[in-house]
Image: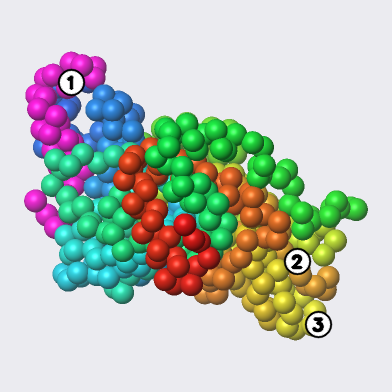
Amino acid sequence: MSKWPDDHWFLREWRNGTGRTIREVAHQAALGASSLNNWELGQARPDIYDLRTLDRYYKAGGALVSLAQAGRHRCDVLPPRQRWWLHFRTDTGPVWAWIRPEGDRPVQIQFSWGIFVGEATANPNGTVFTAPVSARNPAALVEANEPVWIDLGEGTLPPYLDLDFGEESINRMFGIQISEAMRDVLATELKKILEHGYRRSLFDLIVSSWQSTDGQPETRDPGVQDPAVPRTTSSEDSPFIVLSGNQYQRIREQACYDRLSVRDKLDEHRFGPPIRKSAISRLEQGRVVADRNIRSRLDAIYGCDGRTACDPVKVTRQHDWAVVEVPDYWYGPVWIRLQGAAPLEAPVRFRWHPWERLYNARIPSLVTLEAAGPARPLCVDLPRSWTLEAGMGYRPEATEINDGWDIVPGAANYVSALYRPVLLQFARAYGSGLRRLLRRLIGNARASGGSIAP
């Protein structure tokens, strides 16, 4: 076996761990035995539909698909880096991250995941960190002291896979604290679980205490007034190609898609209007493709975190606010270009409900931030003499402003409601052990200056 397992190794070990033969799996999953044998030997590769069939057969919850995609390493196309933003597509449900250092020595990492922060160590052969629940907003951040590759997946990985499962996984809750920004907001929910968790069913308690409509998301951003006459300032010039045609092809193949299955996925409603039949072929030949936002749509499908796209998005002006309309399918970096006349320097307020940030900008400037779900328009309060252009994708020359965001005044209930499913899933995952876990988390918060008290 190479330094990191390949996709065919995962398929073989997953089946061996269940104790089934190739013939049994092929017959029960309605697949060809010879095809399955070739996949496990690495003589052929299954497409995305075959992987989903096997995933359903093993009841893997998407973990087999994600792990097979991770096993087709994209290291030859996408470079390693020290700072990764990870985007979960759904709330609740188990998730994992496979961290693989570029070098041959252990790497120290720090992570900020939803309501939790902590530290961990990734071994040279790769380490898998797991959590019993996911959260979409804000995006998870992993910072390493040396370059690493990270793949993200859903579902539960079986213990019989020969992978290094990190001792600091969120499942084991070792050395993890509640993030400072979340302590006050979640204090009520944490104390509620702690005080009443043993008096009756923990599940029934949380469900009954959270059935009120208080704290439900608002329908519009309170910082944006109704527009008088919306003015569109969209940047519609042709986006440049980040990768060569051959690199786009390799990214697609490593994501387990053929051209037809990619086009079917792109034609889904949430990914925008249908594309031409020749669009994928033209793109992979390095030719000009006019289909709108095709690179960002492919980036979202392939899970490349904005590294293969740089597409513009629509911006409208509503009084002092510029509204950046990021598509629902996009989870990843968003770049903002500020230009205009005097004043040359001014505070700019970014509001992405329920978060906001005040940034002292100087024109011209280019900044980048991470889009996380549930999707809402990004609103930017800037001087009337300034203009704004925006787009999706990674811009290495941009200044990152992902740190220093606060909760929008009056949005504490929204944030609390946002994380109720997360805490509920933790309660279901830990059962009676949750009381001890919460006491330690509350203790960590108090020791570091938090206001949560039992």
Residue assigned mark 2: 381
Image disc number at residue 26: 1
In the image, what residue type sits under mark 1?
A: Ala
User: Which is in the foreground here, disc 2 or disc 3?
Assistant: 2
Sequence order check, earlier mark of 2 and 3: 3
- Residue segment shown in magenta: 1-30
Residue 63 part of the magenta-drawn span = no
The residue identified by callout 3 is 342
- Image point (67%, 72%), residue name: 358
Q: Position of residue 70 (x, y in %)?
A: 28, 48
- Position of residue 107 measured from the top left corner of the image (x, y, whole percent): 24, 70
Residue 169: x and y in percent read 28, 55
SS state under label 2: strand
383, 212: nearer the viewer: 212
Q: Nearer the viewer, residue 145 or 43?
A: 145
The residue most toward the front is: 199
Task: Determine which quarter of the picture holds residue 343.
Answer: bottom right
Tag on residue 444? Answer: none
